[in-house]
Image (cartoon, grey):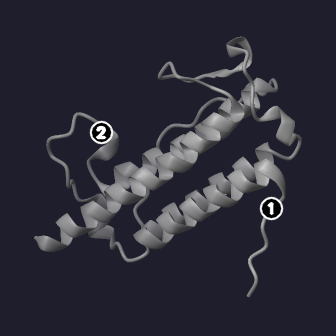
Amino acid sequence: MTKIYRQGAIGGLLDEYERAILDLSQTISDINDKELSTIVDTTTQDSGCESVQSILAHVVCSGYAYALYIRQLFGDQTDFRDDVFRNTTSDYQKDLADFFIYTEDTFKNIADNQLEESDNAKKIVTSWGQVYDIEQIMEHAIVHVLRHRRQIEKFKIQLREK
């Protein structure tokens, strides 16, 4: 079957984001409910990185947050979501698909020429203090998923060595 690619710069960002999300979804497909909630990293100071469950809750919450930051540039006042802890990977797979659809919808009225912004006063200021234009926050979102997929791959090895 031939892959259909989205058009333009936004299409490229969405294609790569979707690819990263699908790869993460595949990575978690063989994780059972016990492995999902098992604390793997007992030394971390980041509660979002202790277990596969906490990582996925963080990834989903962040996925919505990146889209919300973009929507806020255009006047949307929707509140940010809290982490939601699910009991199965299939629930997280649905969440991953849902936040991608939400992100896709975010771009319905945005043109490629709106992605880059050199004026910091017109950029997104995140809760952690970083300043991004739309393209930069989407690139961050893509790498965020990739980094946590890698972290989960390492957790799977640790969980199965026990």
Q: Would you name the residue on which mark 2 appears?
A: 47
Give the residue type that dot 2 points to.
Ser
Q: On the rendered structure, is 78 left or right of 129?
A: right
Q: Crowding at label 1, few (<14), some or many (≥20) Cα neighbours within 10 Å? A: few
Q: Position of residue 19 (x, y in %)?
A: 60, 64
Q: Tag 2: Cα neighbours inside 10 Å, few (<14), some, or many (≥20)?
A: few
Look at 81% across and 26% down and name the residue there: 74
* Amino acid carrying mark 1 in the image: Arg
Seen at 22% across and 34% down, the residue is 45
Of residue 33 and residue 111, the one placed in the foreground of this image is: 111
Residue at 56% in and 44% down: 141
Q: Are marks 1 and 2 in contact (CB under 8 Å)?
A: no
Determine whether the residue tagged by mark 1 lies in a helix, strand or loop: loop
Residue 85 appears anywhere in the view: no
The residue at 41%/51% (across/down) is: 147
Displayed quadrant of residue 65: top right
Marks 1/2: CA distance?
A: 36 Å
Q: Position of residue 24 (x, y in %)?
A: 48, 64
* Mark sitting earlier along the chain (1/2): 1
Among all residues in the image, which is located at the extreme left?
A: 162
The label nearer to you, 1 versus 2, is 1
| In the image, residue 16 above or below residue 9 | below
Which image quarter holds the N terminus? Answer: bottom right
The residue pinned by badge 1 equals 6
Where does residue 157 sit, x and y in percent of width and height? Answer: 22, 69
